[in-house]
Every structure is written in C-alpha cells, then in structure tokens.
Image (tube, rainbow, N blue to C red):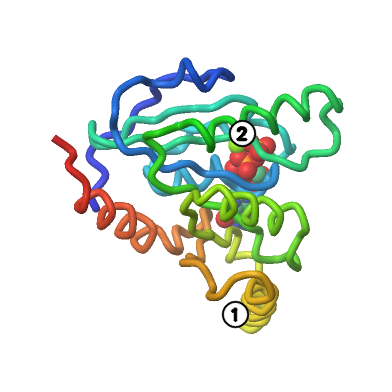
Amino acid sequence: MKIKSAEFVMSNSDVAKCPSSHLPEYAFIGRSNVGKSSLINMLMQRKNLAKTSGRPGKTQLINHFLVNKNWHLVDLPGYGYAKVSKKSKKTFQKFITEYFKSREQLIMGFVLIDCRHEPQPIDLEFMEWLGENQLPFAIIFTKADKLKPKALERNLKAYQEKMLETWVEMPQYFITSSTNATGRDEVLQYIGQINETLDLS
Ligand code: GTP
Ligand code: MG
C-alpha cells in the first residue's frame, strides 16, 4: 500500500469521543517505550506525526491518524509503566481496555513487543485478554536493529515456544525496525489486504 496522506485527527481519553466515522481502524498497543509512536512515524514516513520520547509514558491519550483519507491508525498509551502514579496507571488501563472492547471500528490490534526481551507476563496477559474478548490481533516485534540476526532468531524462537503454551498457533507476526524501516512493506501490505476485503466507500 502506498501512503498518499497521513494526518493527525484528534487525541482524547474518552472512547466515546473518538471519531464517529465508520472508517476501519488499526491500533498499536504495547508496553511503554516499546516503539509504538516511532513505528507509526516509520510506516507513514513522517518524522514527527506521532510524538516519541526516550522516556516511557510519552503517549498518554488515544490518538487518531487518518491515512489515505480512508482508514485510521491509532497510537495508544503504553501499558505497564511503573512510574506513573497508581491512579493514572489505572486510568490508562481502563481506557485502553474500554477502547478495545467498545470501539466497533477497530479491525485489528497490533501488539508491539521489544524483540530484545524474553516474553513478559504483561504482554502475554494482554494477548490472552484480547483472545478471551475475541479481539483480533497481530504481533509486531520492534527494534530489530538492536539485535544481531542470530540473537533475533533465537529470541523469536523462544517467543513462539512461549506462545504455543497458550495458543494453538503463533499469531501473525512482523519483525520491524523504525530506525531502518525493516518490516514497513509487510505491515502496510497486511493492512492493505484487509482493507481490500472491506467496503471503504
Ligand atoms: P510510550 O508512548 O511512552 O508508550 O512509548 P512508545 O511505545 O510510543 O515508544 P516511542 O516510539 O516513543 O519510542 C521509545 C524509544 O525507543 C525512543 O527513544 C525511540 O527512538 C526508540 N525506538 C523506537 N523504535 C525503535 C527502533 O526500531 N530501533 C531503535 N534503535 N530504537 C527505537
Ligand atoms: Mg508513544
């Protein structure tokens, strides 16, 4: 899929106030600092469309971006960031789960996982929660530039083994790097193919 246009639409913390149009939507979720906002910029080939930061907890709201005038990309706050106060942490989690449960336009969630780390309970639990709620998702491994090919292969294998303890098969997954655009074509093609099956008129 070619990206012809990408524009910021709105930020908010209230799922009910998200855009009311029925455009299909794809949301990026994962631990704080995993690279959600960077990945959106990489996919859209825009430096600062989504705000990024070296410090976790940068994205705190639900951010909608309109792509090619006919679908939405959504940048979400990270989960599992211990340093935000307990109260605001709970608020993030509530509106994240609320977003996933009630957003009818949501076609698919992309769960981002830092390829350098071994499987983290919070990610595994979030995917289980998505499964229990019958919400489709795919995995995006991020920061592939930070590992040598052998180490990347080893970590992916370990991740698949862990997933197969719970899932019948490994969900669809992508390997990406926002630094060198690895995986860009694959992720966009995947979204494009799904969009083709939908009526976007
Ligand atoms: P929150 O909004 O805080 O939840 O974080 P986020 O998941 O949106 O992460 P963000 O995109 O802000 O990136 C966090 C840090 O990781 C930044 O310092 C990025 O430059 C860095 N980063 C993100 N993706 C990559 C990548 O593919 N490779 C490398 N080397 N660094 C990356
Ligand atoms: Mg972010």
Count numbered badges in the picture. 2
In the rendered image, residue 161, in percent from the top left (x then y), is placed at 67, 79
Contact between marks 1 and 2 (CB within 8 A): the answer is no
In the rendered image, residue 13, in percent from the top left (x then y), is placed at 59, 19
Q: Few, some or many C-alpha atoms within 10 Å of disc 1 (few <14, some 14-19, many ≥20)? A: few
Q: Which mark's residue is nearer the viewer, 1 or 2?
A: 2
In the rendered image, residue 176, in percent from the top left (x then y), is placed at 50, 61
**Residue occupying the point 63% across, 81% down:** 157
> Which residue reaches farthest left?
201
Question: In the rendered image, is residue 53 in sight?
Answer: no
Q: Secondary structure at mark 1?
A: helix
Using the image, tell me which numbered label, if any, was put on residue 149: 1
Horizontal arrangement in the rendering, residue 201 relative to residue 176 (left or right) = left
**Residue occupying the point 17% across, 42% down:** 199
Using the image, tell me which numbered label, if any, was put on residue 20: none
Q: Quarter for ligand 2?
A: top right
Using the image, tell me which numbered label, if any, was put on residue 96: 2
**Residue occupying the point 54% across, 31% down:** 99
Q: Secondary structure at mark 2?
A: helix
- The amino acid type, in three-letter code, at marker 2 is Ile
Q: CA distance from mark 1 to mark 2?
A: 33 Å
**Residue occupying the point 25% across, 49% down:** 195
